[in-house]
Structures are given as structure tokens and as C-alpha cells.
């Protein structure tokens, strides 16, 4: 009986509250739920790192987290940490960065990964750069680690001059100045070359 009376009193208070009080109550409850969700994402990220280190047979210092900005790009100046720094995306996923340190002697190459995670109906989904996982209940399947590692192995099996990415540029001359044009926009490069040639002819 006391529990029923408390519920009735809560309903009366909600009915008597102002629109702003109702809005504030709903917003605070949403924020608390979201903070709890982010904490669960943080725990998932930490577990993912440990599981991937174990799969690779690497040391704990070979795989660390890095920070992402609002555009989900790596913040180089922030360095790396052993705790994930979460960045909320606009696609329902929460993102964090992973850095793999591939060292040998004085040589070191860093491989950067952007990981997004989302939980729906108790199941996790993950985006590892362009590779997406299926539903994950608990531990990340080894088959997924095999897939993302195979993608990196393929990258490092490709001659560097054949690798094409979003940072690729091609040189072209425009008004007697050398400029760099993104490879994704060759039409602009062609137009600049034509313009430069026309100017010389004139």
C-alpha cells in the first residue's frame, strides 16, 4: 500500500508541475541514462583493447587509445592514453581511437584506428574504420579481429606508391605555381592545367 500511495503522489506532482519542471525532470533523467551508457561504452572499449592485445600477442604498450575531435579525426597533440576518450558521433555511435605502435629497433610506425560502438537491445555493434561487426553479446569474436588485422596486413603488403587514400594529392601547375589538387578531384587539376596553358599562349 505505501508503494501505491507513493506512485499516486508522483503522478499528482507531475500533473501539478510546470512545463519547465516536467522538461527539466525528463532532461535530467535522459542525461543520467546517457552518462550510464557512456560508462558502459568505456568499459567495452577497455575490454576490446585488452582482447585485441591478447589476440595479437602484443604488449600492453603496443596498443593505446588516442583522442578524436568533433569530426572524428585524431588529435595528434593529445598523445595516447590507457583509457578511452569518447567522442559522440551524429550517427548513434560513440567513437574512440586506437593506436598500434609497430616498433623494431629505432623504427616505429603508428597505425591509427577509429572505432565506433553502439548498443541496441543488449547487443553491441562495432565499426572499425570501414569494417562493421555483427551483433556482439559479450567478447569480441576472434573472427572479427582476424578480419580487421587482415585489412592492415593487406595495406602493408601493397607498394606504397599504389596506396590511395583520402590524403592523396596530385601535382599540377596553375599560373606558373605548383599546386596540389586532391586525387578525388582530377577534373579541377585538368582545368587548372588548361588554364595555365591558355595563359602562356596568350
Image (cartoon, rainbow, N blue to C red):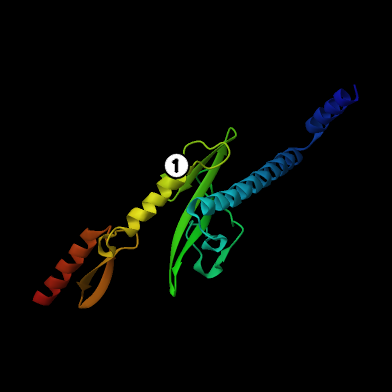
Instruction: Specify whether residue 58 is in view.
Output: yes
Query: Residue 96 location, x and y as percent?
Result: 54, 54
Q: Is residue 69 above or below residue 151?
A: below
The residue that disc 1 covers is 143
Q: At 21% across and 59% down in the image, what residue appears?
A: 187
- Left or right of residue 41: residue 176: left
Instruction: Give whichever of 158, 115 is nearer the camera.
Output: 158
Q: At 36% across and 55% down in the image, what residue appears?
A: 153
Q: Residue furthest top?
A: 1
Under tag 1, what secondary structure?
helix
Q: Residue furthest left?
A: 201
Instruction: Give whichever of 103, 119 is nearer the camera.
Output: 103
Q: Quadrant of the C terminus?
A: bottom left
Instruction: Give whichever of 189, 151 is nearer the camera.
Output: 151
Query: Residue 66 location, x and y as percent?
Result: 54, 61
Q: Quadrant of the N terminus?
A: top right
Q: At 26% across and 72% down in the image, what residue appears?
A: 179
Graded by Cα atoms within 10 Å as few (under 14), some (14 to 19) or many (20 or more), the crowding at tag 1 reads: few
Instruction: Specify whether residue 202 is in view.
Output: no
Amino acid at each position: 500500500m505505501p508503494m501505491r500511495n507513493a506512485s499516486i503522489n508522483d503522478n499528482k506532482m507531475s500533473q501539478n508541475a510546470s512545463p519547465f519542471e516536467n522538461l527539466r525532470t525528463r532532461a535530467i533523467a535522459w542525461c543520467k541514462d546517457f552518462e550510464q551508457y557512456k560508462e558502459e561504452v568505456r568499459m567495452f572499449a577497455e575490454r576490446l583493447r585488452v582482447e585485441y592485445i591478447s589476440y595479437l600477442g602484443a604488449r600492453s604498450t603496443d596498443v593505446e587509445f588516442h583522442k578524436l575531435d568533433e569530426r572524428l579525426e585524431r588529435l595528434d597533440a593529445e598523445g595516447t592514453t590507457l583509457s578511452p576518450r569518447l567522442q559522440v558521433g551524429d550517427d548513434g555511435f560513440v567513437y574512440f581511437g586506437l593506436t598500434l605502435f609497430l616498433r623494431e629497433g629505432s623504427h616505429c610506425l603508428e597505425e591509427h584506428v577509429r572505432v565506433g560502438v553502439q548498443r541496441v537491445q543488449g547487443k553491441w555493434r562495432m565499426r572499425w574504420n570501414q569494417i562493421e561487426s555483427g551483433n556482439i553479446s559479450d567478447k569480441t569474436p576472434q573472427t572479427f579481429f582476424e578480419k580487421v588485422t587482415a585489412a592492415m596486413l593487406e595495406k602493408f603488403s601493397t607498394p606504397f606508391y599504389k596506396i590511395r587514400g583520402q590524403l592523396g594529392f596530385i601535382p599540377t601547375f596553375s599560373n606558373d605555381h605548383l599546386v596540389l589538387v586532391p586525387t578525388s578531384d582530377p577534373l579541377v587539376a585538368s582545368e587548372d592545367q588548361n588554364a595555365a596553358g591558355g595563359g602562356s599562349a596568350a
